[in-house]
Image (tube, rainbow, N blue to C red):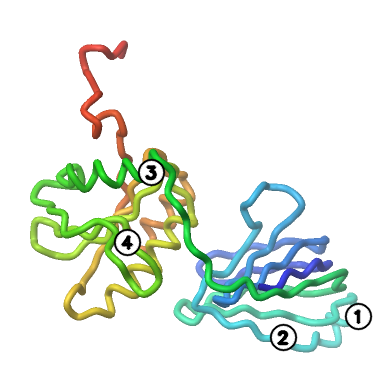
Amino acid sequence: MRLVIAKCSVDYAGRLTAHLPMADRVLMLKADGSVLVHSDGGSYKPLNWMSPPCTTTISEPSAEQAEHGITEIWTVTHQKTGDHLIISIAQIRDEISAELGVDPGLVKDGVESHLQELLAEHIETLGSGYSTVRREYMTAIGPVDILAKDDAGASVAVEIKRRGEIDGVEQLTRYLELMNRDPILAPVTGVFAAQEIKPQARTLAEDRGIRCVVLDYDALRGMDDPDSRLF
């Protein structure tokens, strides 16, 4: 992990285009190759980013760029889409690098764990003819919450969150890429299930062919009484 505080501008070119003018920002370069651009606001969400698989190259600025104070150009290229994240560095104010090692993974809280248990018991919530193969199906990069079969007998990987955000979609995407290399499982489709799914997460999931399902915790627990509703 490398953290760099730098005065920089950022341009994204590809399926979408975006520009961040020159300002002080935090650049996060992770061991998996991903690069994230943060400001001193906006909580945890980066201003822009490039997800793996991607590569970063550092080059000298052009004469015109150098005249405007640019000292180096970072180009982050996605290996599948060809999208580019271009970071023009004017000044590096500080930086730190550290080996974080293997992360032990997320320990699910009680509600999230219970959602997994309930959905596995009532997998038909995802569609008629669905069946549960097993919970916590282990892959080389961690366990998928539920491995299921759809009504046609095809494999379905289900990732469950209490609050569905972009990180969860990225996690499921990595599982799907790995599982689809297994000829016994492939083809594997994905379902992103949560009590609440953020609009950005839904957009990213649907763009990647992942189906989104909003879970009703009370209904799964058998506590949803239609007669007690006000509306």
Q: Decide which of 30, 199 is in the foreground and name it.
A: 30
Q: Residue at x 63, y 51 (%)?
A: 44
Q: Which mark is residue 67?
A: 1
CA distance for labels 2 and 1: 18 Å
Q: Residue at x 81, y 64 (%)?
A: 22
**Badge 4 amino acid:** Val
Q: Secondary structure at mark 4?
A: strand
Instruction: Please state if 83 lies on the left or on the right of 162 as rendered.
Output: right
Where is residue 156? Give x, y as percent: 22, 61
**Badge 3 amino acid:** Glu
Q: Secondary structure at mark 1?
A: helix
CA distance for labels 3 and 2: 42 Å
Q: Residue at x 62, y 68 (%)?
A: 12
- Say which residue label 2 marks: 58
CA distance for labels 1 and 3: 54 Å
Q: Secondary structure at mark 3?
A: helix
Q: Earlier in the sequence, mark 2 or mark 1?
A: 2
- Say which residue label 3 marks: 112
Mark 2 or 4, closer to the camera: 4
